Amino acid sequence: MACGEGQTPRPRPSRGRGAGRVVVLLAAWLLGLCCRAAGERIRYAIPEELGRGSLVGPLARDLGLSPAELPARKLRVVSAAKKQLKYFSVSEESGELYVSERLDREEMCGEAASCSVSFEALVENPLNVFHVHVDIQDVNDNSPRFLQDTFQLEINELTSSGARFSLGAAEDPDVGSNSLQGYELEANKYFEVEMKEKQDGKKFAELVLHRALDRESEQSVRLVLTALDGGDPPRSGTAQLCINVTDANDNPPVFAQDRYQVSLREDALPGSTVLNVSASDADAGTNARITYGFGKMPKKVLDKFVVDAETGIITLKEELDYEDIHMFSLELVARDGGGLVAHCEVEVEVLDVNDNAPEITILSVSSPVPEDAPAGTVVALLNVNDADSGENGDVRCELSGEAPLSLVASSGGSYKVLTGSALDREQASEHRVRVVARDRGSPSLWSSAELVLEVSDVNDNAPVFEEAAYSAYVSENNAAGAAVVRVVARDADAGANGRVSYWLAGGSAGAAPYVSVEARSGAVYAQRSFDYEQCREFTVAVRAQDGGAPARSSTATVRVFVLDRNDNAPRVLWPPAGTAGPEPSSSSSSSSSSSSSSSVAFEVVPRSAEAGYLVGKVVAVDADAGRNAWLSYELVQAAEPALFRVGLHSGEVRTARAVSERDAAKQRLVAVVKDHGQPALSATATLHVVLAESLQEALPELSERAAGADSPAELQFYLVLALALLSALFLLSVALAVLARLRRAGPPAVLRCLDAQRFSVPGAAFPADFCEGTLPYSYNLCVAPGRALPEPAWPPPPVPSLPAEELLAGEPCGERSPSPSAGPAQPPARPDAPQVCKPERYRSAPSPFFFPSLCSE
């Protein structure tokens, strides 16, 4: 029967195959469920060909996570090799690992003895990574298959028994017991089949001739070759053997070696010579002419190499890639002209070249990181992979850049980026580092990836004022709401932690009502108009606080100085305001008061007074300060302008020349007191002077004035004056009687002032409510020395209206104690000024006179 005709392959029966496969799948699935995480590596084992949605294992439970923790921990799977993630997924609700795509071990791992998928399980809060390893177990889902359905053989009839003919190997993608286990040949009388195993474990079939052929009796033989695996149930594949019997060719070709080994670098260029093989044939003629070719091999091998049919030189056809295939097995066939063939195997080992740079994959970054995160906090997870092998795939990682970060290696090419020290957002709000991965190949290859870590703010800085103490100067009489000063505090924090607000936090007593502070800008405003005469300076404390939680604050002191303005006109203390008539308005001040009084004070000047005689003193004060309180005096009106002069700074009224008989007995002097402010303010004082040798001589002048006065006020004044004089005369008489009685026992200390002869006009009397001012000096005029009466003589009799108690109440100069209501103590009189005694003011009636005390010196 001719080859290819008549017979069909007979498949082997499959008894119980379906039930056996179910048992294998169930056992493998149960093995995966029993897997538990060990340390940081979780391992599962599942059979291949599981359908989508099949359970792999309770991943969350194996990681020690409860279902309540899953939403916060955000369990998910990641991998640097993204194509592996398509096979598995994790449930967000239960945390169980499922198959998301059909698993085909042969497609995933090819002919490898073991097949597994590795990826990382990533959890957050805190951030950590676990390595998951899923072993894919083989299932006998592939039948052995020959590379060709029909084998054509030509065997010479003279071929002796024992001749062997290689039939090649059947392919079975399964591994282990599920892979190819043997061959069977259909029963016949000429041939047997034997299985041979190569060093790489491949099992191929050899056809053995155990009985000589006879072309005349049988020109061809057709047999069925069966390949069997060891699965349960077993699977098989068949091919037809078509053997044509030819005439004799006694000697087949013979290769120099049955097996060749050659190494080739993966960067070898196409066209490079791989190996030159040769075979010999003892025959002659056409039976000895040998041609070379490849046997039946996979297409991916045939695409890489080509052999010259005449010379047997094997040449590289395409570029090699060690990472794709690192070993090729070539079957070379030598055929002579008579049809006899010889076989040899050429193993081509591909040598790895460092042609792959490390690949860096940033799995997760915790950004931003709070600046108070402790050292050692995990902020990022990396995975580094190098497709090369050996030293070419041995990778070391490091961080490049100035940042408080460190890199710690984990298992499976993973790295953790940790904080190496405390972070400070105020120094650096962002850290940029480069992760550099470098292999150990020669030359070394490297790659890098930038890692950006933001630092979030924590309220760790209190506001800081630009100045610890502020000074502000505000003129008095300012408008309410006027800006005083602006305080500025800066906070190095960000957002609400750096948003500063201000408020008052105390200060000097009573200072709070004076100012207010704007919360946002720090501007300090006056709450009221300031008065230098009431408050010259005050201090407030301003607190600056940020908006953090908890808040931080600091305090600065604001000292406000009130500047004086010339807003107070001079105030005349002497002569009293009641003695002044209508006053002319000053040149630069507002109109002065023009009220008059019925009481008039007089200064008595003897007509024998020489030039420079002290008539009186204009005493004035100014409530302002500085130049605004510097006073000058000027005589602006006088009946005899040449007779009197006034001291520019002292206010003392003195005679400019000697008094003459032609001068009027009554003189009215008007002095103006002016300060040095801008503009200047002034006041006027009116002084009445009577030129007479004694008070008795001056009385007619006073009576003439009383007689000529028609107003009821003046009449009442003189009636009161007469009553006062009568009372004074009575009291003086009693006092003299007492003195005469006491004289016999020795003069008492109270009468030591009776030696003076001349009376003086009293000095200035200051009101009790006066607190401060600028008095140049105070004085009390005393009788000039050398005018005392002789020892046996008594002083002239006093005027009738002078009370005796007034005389007895007189005090020696410098011995009178200040009255509690007399205001501040006056400075001592200048050495060149005349000595003055200050009398007590007569208060019982509105008298126009202020009587002098008697001086003993």
Image (cartoon, rainbow, N blue to C red):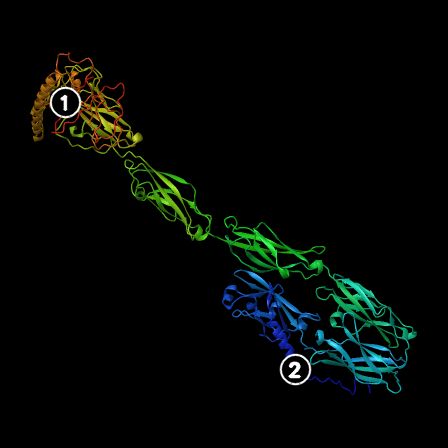
Q: For mark 2, what is the residue?
A: 18
Which of the 4 image quarters holds residue 172? bottom right
407 shown above or below 71: above
Res 606 seen here? no
* Disc 2: CA contacts within 10 A as few (<14), some (14-19) or many (>=20): few
Relative to the observer, which residue lies in front, 585 or 609? 609
Decide if residue 730 is on the left or right side of residue 52.
left
Instruction: Report, in whole angstroms, how far the alpha carbon at label 2 lies from the one at label 1.
Output: 149 Å
Q: Earlier in the sequence, mark 2 or mark 1?
A: 2
Which of the 4 image quarters holds residue 214? bottom right
Which of the 4 image quarters holds residue 788? top left
Q: Position of residue 551 (x, y in %)?
A: 42, 51
Q: Position of residue 165 (x, y in %)?
A: 83, 77
Relative to the observer, which residue lies in front, 43 or 461? 43
- Determine contact: label 2, label 1, CB under 8 Å: no
Q: Which residue appears at 71% of the width and 85% of the height?
A: 13
Callout 1: SS = helix
490 shown above or below 186: above
Q: Position of residue 398 (x, y in %)?
A: 63, 53
Relative to the observer, which residue lies in front, 847 or 591? 847
Q: Quadrant of the C terminus?
A: top left
Q: For mark 1, what is the residue?
A: 808
Callout 2: SS = helix
Res 835 seen here? yes
* Disc 1: CA contacts within 10 A as few (<14), some (14-19) or many (>=20): some
